[in-house]
Image (tube, grey):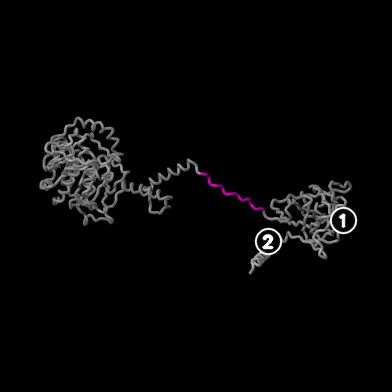
Amino acid sequence: MPREAYIGRVGGLVVALGVGVAIVTGWSSGLAWADEPGGASGSSTSSAGSERPQAPGATSGEADSSGTTTATSPSTTGTTGTKTKDGAVRSAPPRVVVGTGGRTENDPAPTTTTAQPNETAAPSPTGTGKSPVSKLTTKKKTHPAAARPTKTRAPVPASTVADARHDATMPAAATHTEPTDTVDTNLVADSRQPSAAVSLRMASIQSSPAEPPTLAAPSPPLPTVVGVVSRLVSDAVNAILSPFTASSTPGAPADAPSMWALLAFARREFERAFTSPSLTESPVDAQTTSETRTLILSAFPAETDAILARTTLDPNPTVVVDGHHFYLGTLGGKKVIVGMTGIGMVNATRTTEAALDYFTPESGISIDAVVFSGVAGGSGRTEIGSVAVPARWTSDGGETWHAVDPDMLAAANTLDVDLLSTDSIGDPACSCGLLAGPRIDLEREPQLFVGGDGASDDNNNGTAFPAIPLGGAIFGPQPCAAPDRSLLFTGNFLQAVGPFLAFGLLSNITGLFTDMPPAVDAVDMETAAAQQVADAHGIPFLGIRGMSDGPGDPLNLPGYPFTFFVYKQIAADNSAIVTEVFLSSWDGA
């Protein structure tokens, strides 16, 4: 089918739909038409020079500028009409305005007058409902003899809508008042259209309920610097505090993967720092499943890392007791509990007491012996790198002595070990070994000495030495190889720093220059304190110490503490080697 046929059918369908919509939606109430006999045109010509009779009392301004306007009274029935100049009758339904004006090419342009608000029209003398016709003129006239009745104009409701379909000219404002039985209703139009714009006009006045005004939704406020900063601070606080308020209820996901990573990191760090994982996944019956383990203690991270490097940890290795972290595993074929006490006599006492009070048959794990492994200062026969296993220890400068467990000492006396003569300066477990530093060489074979004496003391004036967060392999609060290591863990820093600064710092500094260590095989700051707690609980005890300072310095350093920082790692590793070999040869308590 040709394209034109399609266009024609579509156009016809559009016209039909438009007509149907107009009829259904009520546009017929505003429809105007003219019944012309014999096919007469819809508008009749008028001459500007013709005179039309004017009713008494009517003014020329009451006539419409485009022609004669006729209004019907509601009291009349049927269709009313107006006879035009050529005799044709133009009719319309009741309450419909019919315009009979029109201009042809031969007619001169009519002039218009403006209707005044107070002007009224006299009733039609014939009583047919026709309005008198005014003569078109440019001058406003007033009949002096005619009575001028006043017609009250009702205010136009805001809901009145004038729907006028006309040509592209300025719409005329119209007012409407209800007529009475004796006075016809006139529709007065204030027309300011150009004289050339004369056409058939159809208008309908409809009343509808007033619709409430629609308020526009307020636009969201623009973000401000304060709002952005507040949001960032709020997100940071939520990320830090979320582990404390975490629940099983699922929440909304984070806005970006970076936020998820931040939340996961913060939660992991806080859980490692402040929570204690269970020993087993199910409750343990202390009477039937209790096991015995050996408690292995060390003072600072480098010493504990040397033990953990040779220990096979359990699947759930971490146990936290009163802020002290212990790790379960196997060393030298024996079940062990590895713990770090911290530097000093007070820290060693508190950590040993916490372990012995908690690990009892009721907890499912009991301690059968205590071994303290670490570094010490030597004298006499114990050179740097050597290992001493003293038979007794003192904590008061030799006034009193406490012997170690004889069976454990006898087992140590049978050991044959190969100790390290070369090692790194730093702890390879810290910073992924990047800060391990160069290697040192003792240029000799270190020896193991079993028996003799050991002494423990510190210059902290009875206060706990505070661990320093991020303090590394010596002053840090956790071993670098700890399975639950957290950068946020502070150890005893918050509790101990105040008393130490007030009462222990000055004595600690002066002790470095005035204290003369006793002439014993090993001098440290923790072993005797831990031994006294073990003796009080009736637990066998043994101390194993590698020499980090003393005679035999191949580098000829000024002495302590310089030798301590250089040789602490080889001393800790050699002590851990002896501890592992001891556990593998000892039958247990």
* Magenta: main secondary structure: loop
**Residue 402 seen anywhere in this rendered image of the structure:** no
Q: Report the front residue among 9 and 269.
A: 9
Q: Is residue 219 magenta?
A: yes
The amino acid type found where label 1 is placed reads Pro
Circle 1: element type: loop
Give the percent coordinates (x, y) of residue 497. Answer: 29, 36
Task: List x then y, in percent, for residue 284.
Answer: 25, 55
Q: Secondary structure at mark 2?
A: loop
- The residue identified by callout 2 is 25
Residue under label 1: 125
2 or 1: mark nearer the eye: 2
Label 2 close to label 1 by CB (< 8 Å): no
Between disc 2 and disc 1, whose residue precedes?
A: 2
- State the residue at coordinates (56%, 47%): 218
Quadrant in the rendering for residue 19? bottom right
Other-residue count near label 1 (Cα within 10 Å), few / some / many at <14 / 14–19 / ≥20: few
Q: Which of the two residues, 576 or 517, is positioned nearer the viewer here?
A: 576
Where are the magenta residues, as a range? Answer: 210-222
